[in-house]
Amino acid sequence: MDSHKGDEIELQALISLIDEPDYVSFTKVKEQIFNIGPPAVPLLESAWENTFDVNVQRRIEDIIHNIQFNQLHFDLVKWAHFKDTDLLEGFVLFTKYQYPSMNIDLLKEQIGKLKKDIWIELNESLTPLEKVKVLNHIFYDHYKFRLPEKQEADVRYLFLNNLMETRMGYSISLGILYTVIAQSLGMPIKGLLLPGERYFMAWIESDPLGADRVKFCINPENKGGIFTKEELIVLLKKLKFPTQENYFVPLKPNYIIEKMFEMLAYLYSAAGDTSKQDELLRLKDACSD
């Protein structure tokens, strides 16, 4: 008997004990299954489908969630501490909190098609402004990415898979996808965070001393509307916000995903669901430097 088959038989034996009435004994079984990690999930899901005992189903759901949460926390820590952190990977990991079994390959295939459709319309003779106008046309006019039709607090508007499926999302979700696409096409577009937690983008160039300089800003809420930095400062003053230079400092990818977990926690709380707050705080902290 090979070791894999032996491990599977051992796991099946442990799963058969999930209905153990003695809580102390069940806790030991649960810990042993948890220690096996993600490879245990498919057999646990099969066991869930093949039982009509609601208590057993609830126990299985709890074990699966704990395994997937632990793996997600590990993956986020690993992602956040990599050099040149990939923003798309962070967005995928964020989405996995709600959809741990989503088809990531299909998602990346959809994003790849969007990128290709924009790339076909670009050429090296275009100015930065012209390149952004091409991106805006394909992203907003052809693919019709947009804000939700109603102003409502709904967590689904944060997640990448829902964004790709419905073409609707909050400004931060639209902005992150826009940033990912732009960077994959070689455009130096990065995220900014304005007062009120408003996600903007900016075309960033280096000055002669190597410091970042904002060439122009892009509003994901307004079909990629373009503003100069000076116009944005005037607008902030009119809205009585203090103008701070750190508004125009590009955000690190891990900080962007931290803000996503923070917003997700807020939306759940606003909907009256406080059960996920501790988990989301841990995942937010996992993204920290």
Image (spheres, helix red, strand yellow):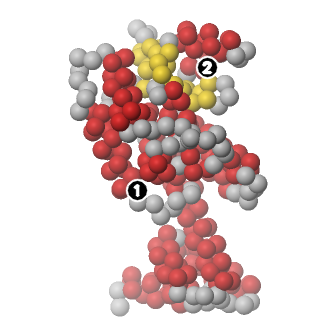
Distance, label 1 to label 2, CA atoms, is 34 Å
**Quick check: marks 1 and 2 in contact, CB under 8 Å?**
no
The residue drawn where x is 33% and y is 18% is: 130
Residue 119 occupies quadrant: top left
Seen from the viewer's position, the closer of residues 16 and 58 is 58
Left or right: residue 93 compared with residue 242: left
Percent x, y of residue 88: 44, 43
> In the figure, residue 105 lies in which quadrant?
bottom left
Q: Which residue is mark 2?
A: 246
Q: What kind of residue is marked 1?
A: Ile
Q: Which residue is at 61% across, 50% downward? A: 155
Query: Total label count?
Result: 2
Q: In the picture shown, does residue 225 fall above or below 253?
A: above
Q: Which mark is on residue 104?
A: 1
Label 1 Cα neighbours within 10 Å, binned few <14 / some 14-19 / many ≥20? some
Q: Position of residue 189 (x, y in %)?
A: 43, 26
Is residue 141 rendered to the left or right of residue 27?
left
